Image (tube, grey):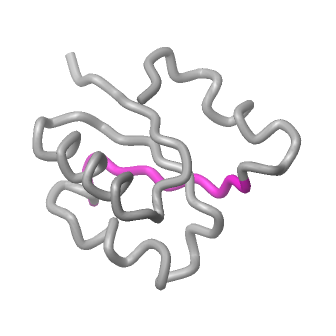
Amino acid sequence: MQQTRQLVENSGFIACWLVKLLLQHGYTVKATVGDPSDKKKTDHLLALDGTKQRLQLFKAELLDEGVFDIISVVHEYV
């Protein structure tokens, strides 16, 4: 069974390392970033091994109301 992990706001250094480690261990990662189309904030994530198969990026601004609604269907959080 493939396991999924949700990470919130993943454009930073530490979050990038968490994404990398989870991908290396075979997890599917659902990650939020301020703007998934902003290559400056996502290129480092999309360059990691396994991203084409197991990384999904979602637009989410942490200060926006309801931001956690998009991840509420995921049962396990990091």
Quadrant placement of the C terminus: top left
Report the front residue among 1 and 44. 44
Side of 46 relative to 59 (left or right): left
Side of 46 relative to 25 (left or right): right
For the point 45% across and 42% down, the residue is 30
For the point 55% across and 52% down, the residue is 9
Q: Where is residue 24 in the image (x, y as percent from the top left)?
A: 11, 45
Count the marks: how many?
0
Q: State yes or no: residue 32 in magenta.
A: no
Q: Quick one: which residue is furthest to the front in this view?
A: 14
Q: Where is residue 50 in the image (x, y as percent from the top left)?
A: 18, 55
For the point 56% across and 80% down, the residue is 38
Vertical order, 32 against 75 (above or below): below
Q: Quick one: which residue is furthest to the bottom in this view?
A: 40
Side of 73 relative to 75 (left or right): right
Q: Give the range drawn in magenta.
A: 52-61
Q: Position of residue 49 (x, y in %)?
A: 15, 61
Report the front residue among 69 and 18. 18
Vertical order, 11 against 63 (above or below): below
Q: Quick one: which residue is furthest to the right in this view?
A: 65
